[in-house]
Amino acid sequence: MTHIAYLGTGLLGSAFAEAAAKRGDEVTVWNRTADKARALEQFGVHVAATPADAVRGATRVHLVLKDDPVVDDVIAALRPGLGPDAIIVDHTTTQPKLTGERSARLNAEGVRYIHCPVFIGPAAARAGQGIILASGPKPLFDAVKDALSHMAPRVEYFGERPDLAAVYKLCGNAIIIGLSGIMADVFAIARGSDVAPDDALRLLDFFDPGAIIAGRGRNMAKRNFAPAFELVMARKDVRLMMESANGTPLITLPAIAARMDALIAEGLGASDLGVLGKDSVG
């Protein structure tokens, strides 16, 4: 039986801890709000009073926390109980620069730390589904990769540069958040035209936005702005979208329209819509 610890038992951390206990691991947890941790006792999980108590005797310590300051505070608090061979596996979504600095500092001090953010929700965590990203020292990844594979079927290692997993996590979340904003605008257009949200989603039965994102994204990355969908025509369509929303608040389209207007004023109206990202791709 492997002794592991989970520090941070919010929605995701508690789901990970529950799944680990059901797989047969000996799990100890800690959380700032103790009641959230105690809810896991029904699964045989031990609740510790402090971070140091939680990690004492653990071979693997998983962090599922809020942000960089909390990660730093909790690591400082757990270190008195951390064994010399224990590995800290940090699943927190954090700022890349700070993540790289944290990894370099801790590993130089003899604390075995690797950053492994995830694309996993609570239900998926309980079912052992989703994607785990990882970057940092290769020996540490090799030591935890089998355990990570029990948590999710896909584990992507990006090499020893310690901030890369943090970068890719933010890029992925930008897609998720951006698409959520776009979907809100889709529903606004539909509402302004007396179409129900569920009916608007019928578009996805035959329209594949993923393929469009990948194709235009590759051209944008290569700075290939040869026109397939001219910016001036796309701007006209955005005007029609905003008019069709008929006063329903829009999330993303007004900002896109403003950027289009600026680029058209620069003389780029005949370029492809992908020219929106010309300053982003260098």
Image (cartoon, rainbow, N blue to C red):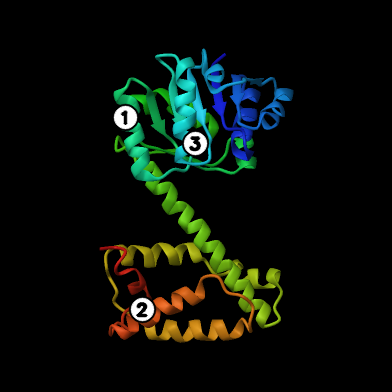
**Residue drawn at the location 50% of the way across and 85% of the way down:** 239
**Whether residue 44 is situated above or below residue 272 in the rendered picture:** above
Label 2 SS: loop
Question: Dot 3 corresponds to which residue?
Answer: 70
Separation of residues labelled 2 and 3 (CA atoms): 47 Å
Within the image, what quadrant is residue 115 found in?
A: top left
Q: Residues within 10 Å of mark 2 (few under 14, many from 20)?
A: few
Q: Residues within 10 Å of mark 3 (few under 14, many from 20)?
A: few
Do the residues bearing badges 1 and 2 touch, measured as CB atoms within 8 Å?
no
Label 3 SS: helix
Within the image, what quadrant is residue 247 found in?
A: bottom right
Within the image, what quadrant is residue 222 found in?
A: bottom left
Label 1 SS: helix
Residue 81: image x %, image y %? 49, 15
**Residue drawn at the location 42% of the way across and 85% of the way down:** 233
Question: Dot 1 corresponds to which residue?
Answer: 105
* Image side of residue 221 versus residue 215, left or right: left
First of labels 1, 3 by sequence position: 3
Residue 87: image x %, image y %? 43, 22
**Residue drawn at the location 69% of the way across and 20% of the way down:** 44
Please state which amino acid type lies under the numbered disc 1. Answer: Arg
Front-most of residues 169 and 111: 111
**Whether residue 279 is situated above or below residue 192 in the rendered picture:** above
* Image side of residue 38 versus residue 63, left or right: right
**Residue drawn at the location 68% of the way across and 32% of the way down:** 36
Q: Nearer the viewer, mark 1 or mark 2?
A: 1
Residue 116: image x %, image y %? 44, 36
First of labels 1, 2 by sequence position: 1
Question: Dot 2 corresponds to which residue?
Answer: 228
